[in-house]
Amino acid sequence: MRLSAASTMDTERMGSEDWAELQRNLEATIPVYDRINRFATFGQDKRWRKMVRSRLPIEGKILEVGCGPGTFAEMIPDRDLTCLDPIPAMLSVAEKRVNSQRETPAKFVEATAEEMPFEDASFDGVCSLFSFRDWYDKRAGLNEVKRVLKPGGKVVIVDPAKMNRVHGWLGYMWMRVWVGAYARYICKMSDHPWKWLTKTYVHFGTTKDYVKMLKECGFTDVKAKVVFPGMATIWSATKPNE
Ligand SMILES: C[S@@+](CC[C@H](N)C(=O)[O-])C[C@H]1O[C@@H](n2cnc3c(N)ncnc32)[C@H](O)[C@@H]1O
């Protein structure tokens, strides 16, 4: 694993200690993951997931990076699907949930975005929903995504939006106060793991930062849309035909 040893977090990277603690906290969210997501986004996350689905290529092999407990994967039961996540507990919850609804089972793979165990040009579409901000090396992850995409293949990413500093501050307050209170009082999790949602958001870059990164990684047709009500961005980009 090419994790940096230091406990640092910025718009591109996260140190090994922070990433390990984030992973422990993400694992602790499994029982309440969907409930808190729905609450935190006023139910909009489902609409954003549908927008991701509609942007994926209509044919061919799809890879979801950071599949978590399978919330998006279960929405594409008829696609040739591979789900990747570094947390074994996430994969086992996702596998039961997703494959119980499919005729042809999806594949579940334990790995990270930064080091994917797939051949070059394996997939027609790659998506990542609410996971990109958790990648410990976003540029390395995007380069890997490009490597495993077929020429002409498409990547679609959704994660919280941050248009500028003021918007970022509003997003921070939203997560800290609203989502934090829900986790503490409704889900009765005192030292709740959702505080990491706020932490990764604080260090996450702006919508434009990742448009620039996608272009620098060699993607073309790079687009970003901040979706209603300004809480999420959907990025999409294409691997050029060589
Ligand atoms: C919030 S969950 C996303 C769940 C799901 N994609 C959804 O639609 O809601 C984020 C997931 O990203 C995974 N993750 C964290 N770091 C990662 C990395 N470096 N590479 C791939 N996945 C990662 C976590 O293990 C976690 O399961």
Image (cartoon, rainbow, N blue to C red):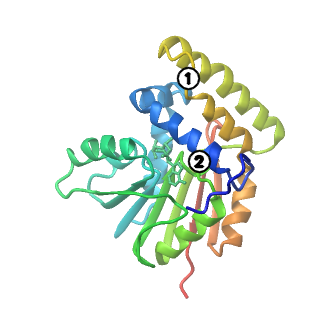
Q: Is residue 216 visible?
A: yes
Residue at the extreme front: 5
Name the quarter where the C terminus is drawn: bottom right
Q: Is residue 180 left or right of residue 78?
A: right
As drawn, is 5 to the left or to the right of 156?
A: right
Where in the figure is residue 176, as x and y percent of width and height?
Answer: 67, 24
Q: Residue placed farthest to the left in the image?
A: 103
* Residue 36 numbered mark, or none: none
Q: Is residue 53 above or below residue 154?
A: above
Label 1 amino acid? His
Q: Quadrant of residue 167?
A: top right
Q: Quadrant of the N terminus?
A: bottom right
Q: CA distance from mark 1 to mark 2?
A: 17 Å
Residue at the image position 57 percent from the left and 20 percent from the top: 191
Report the residue at 49% width, 58% height from top.
112
To which residue does mark 1 refer? 192
Q: Is residue 226 above or below residue 188?
A: below
**On the image, numbered disc 2 is attached to which residue?**
134
How many labels sit on residues? 2
Q: Amino acid at mark 2?
A: Asp
> Which sits in the foreground, 66 or 150?
66
**Does the beta carbon at disc 1 come under 8 Å from ligand 1?**
no
Q: Relative to the observer, which residue lies in front, 66 or 136?
A: 136
Question: Left or right: where does residue 166 sit relative to residue 98?
Answer: right
Q: Residues within 10 Å of mark 1 (few under 14, many from 20)?
A: some
Q: In percent of the image, x 43 and y 46: which residue is there? A: 87
Label 2 C-beta lies within 8 Å of the nearest ligand 1 atom: yes
